[in-house]
Amino acid sequence: MLVDSHCHLDCIDLSEFDNSFDQLVKQTVDSGVEHMLCVSINLDKYPAMLEKVRPYENISVSAGMHPMAEQSDTFTIEYLTELASDDKVVAIGETGLDYYYHKDDPAWQQERFRAHIRVANELDKPVIIHTRDAGDDTLDILRQEGAERCGGVIHCFTETQEFADRAMDLGFMISISGIVTFRNADALRDIARTIPDEYLLIETDSPYLAPVPHRGKQNQPLFVRHVAQTLAQIRETSVEHIAEVSRTNFYRLFETAHR
């Protein structure tokens, strides 16, 4: 059985599933995906997301605010701590740094990132990291804030081998998405080949970044099998091994996720 360690179920267009969230979940489970982590990106929409997935034991959630979400009065450490204290919440984030559009004014992102890590350490829940064009600052802040205490994952990994090594030195797992199936992703495949089994997770980031052979279409959690298949090929192992390793790592990292 597979686990999708990072998806945004509340963002999926349900028209492909007879406008039924139940149908989306059923098709996913029937395809061999036993658990999904629905990741928060917007605190304004968080209550609706939580209400949608709360009845499902095979869906866990995180609480946090994406680094690309604009500055907002909604975000406070107190509010995030309150949300993240819910038993359904197994992680903090996704958080991190994205300088693609904010190179000239990174201070507010950095402070919000630090706040997420502080909440993660306080609640002893792992943190989910998004990083884009900000590798050195991301690692520096993780180290400065003592993020090795809460641990976590670098999601949708597209960084360098050096970044991967430094992140793993902090105890962070590396999550591989459908990007690894893309034709121009040789550099990522080279790095994915080197990640030790005990640090490997897989994800879809649904509804974004659909893997080959579904590229350009809406992504969904059952497509995580294509990530597992590609990793099995490049790591010269079986899909079953990738599934078991990533599944074991998921439940080890997100200890409160329901089995």
Image (cartoon, rainbow, N blue to C red):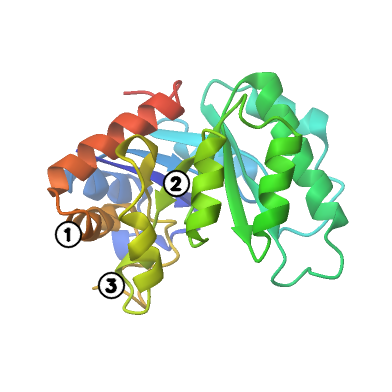
Q: Residue at x 25, y 56 (%)?
A: 231
Question: Which of pointers 1 and 3 indicates the residue nearer the eye?
Answer: 1
Label 3 element class = loop
Count of labels in the image = 3
Name the amino acid type tagged 1: Gln
Comparing 126 with 86, the one in front is: 126
Name which of mark 2 and mark 1 comes first in the sequence.
2
Q: Quadrant of the N terminus?
A: top left
Say few, some or many: other residues with alpha carbon within 10 Å of mark 2 (under 14 / 14 to 19 / 20 or more).
Answer: many
Label 1 element class = helix
- Classify 217 as above or below 114: below
Left or right of 142? Residue 164 is left
Comparing 189 with 8, the one in front is: 189
Name the amino acid type tagged 3: His
Name which of mark 2 and mark 3 comes first in the sequence.
2
Residue position marked by numbered label 3 in the rendering: 214
Q: Determine the CA span between mark 2 and mark 3.
A: 23 Å
Name the amino acid type tagged 2: Ile
Q: Which mark is residue 174?
A: 2
Report x, y in % for residue 153: 51, 41
Q: Are marks 2 and 3 in contact (CB under 8 Å)?
A: no
Report x, y in % for residue 33: 25, 43
Residue position marked by numbered label 1 in the rendering: 233
Say few, some or many: other residues with alpha carbon within 10 Å of mark 3 (under 14 / 14 to 19 / 20 or more).
Answer: some
Name which of mark 1 and mark 3 comes first in the sequence.
3
